[in-house]
């Protein structure tokens, strides 16, 4: 088999369809929790007989990783990762957390900009 054919199979829509069980969207409650910067932490270890992609997610999230990072590490689209994470969230095998750092207050930023302009 040629290298081009192997790459096509790895990223083929058919493969992604099989991985997600034909689902294109995560459940509404799980999807509401997840965005690219949501941190995911495994609560359990991978189990024998588990779908390989679920096991991979549990292995890479032993320390917090964002949804975008999980997607990059596993080489799967964010949409597929979101569906898989929804499965793991519903089974309470992973935990979703908001990122530790939040954006500073807009008033503070405006005050800093004003102060810099006055220099």
Image: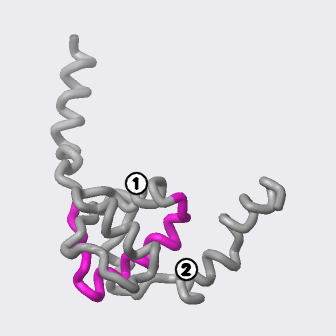
What residue would you read off at disc 2? Answer: 19
Q: Looking at the picture, does residue 108 appear above or below residue 35?
A: above
Q: Position of residue 97 (x, y in %)?
A: 21, 65
Report helix, strand or loop for mark 1. helix
- Say whether residue 35 is left or right of residue 19: left
Contact flag, marks 1 and 2 (Cβ < 8 Å): no
* Residue 74 x %, y %: 48, 60
Answer whether residue 82 is magenta in the image: yes
Query: Which quarter of the rendering shows the N terminus?
Result: bottom right
Residue ranking furthest to the top: 119
Calculate the distance from the C-alpha at mark 1 to the C-alpha at mark 2.
19 Å
Tell me the SS state at disc 2: helix
- For the magenta stretch, what is the residue range? 75-98
Q: In the figure, is residue 82 to the left or right of 64?
A: right
Give the residue pinned by disc 1: 69
Report the label total. Answer: 2
Tell me where residue 22 appears, x and y as whole percent: 59, 88
At horizontal 19% and vertical 73% (from top left) the residue drawn is 43
**Which badge, 1 or 2, is on the more N-terminal residue?**
2
Decide whether residue 49 is among the magenta residues. no
Which residue shows up at 61% across the image and 75% down it?
Answer: 16
Q: Is residue 73 above or below residue 116?
A: below
């Amino acid at each position: 088999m040629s290298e081009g054919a192997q790459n096509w199979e790895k990223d083929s829509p058919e493969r992604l369809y099989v991985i997600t069980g034909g689902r294109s969207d995560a459940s509404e409650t799980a999807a509401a929790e997840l965005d690219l910067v949501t941190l995911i932490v495994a609560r359990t270890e991978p189990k024998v007989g588990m779908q390989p992609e679920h096991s991979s997610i549990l292995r890479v999230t032993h320390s917090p990783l964002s949804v975008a990072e999980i997607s990059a590490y596993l080489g799967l689209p964010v949409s597929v990762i979101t569906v898989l994470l929804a499965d793991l969230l519903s089974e309470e095998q992973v935990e979703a957390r908001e990122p530790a750092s939040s954006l500073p207050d807009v008033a503070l930023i405006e005050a800093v900009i004003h102060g810099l302009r006055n220099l």
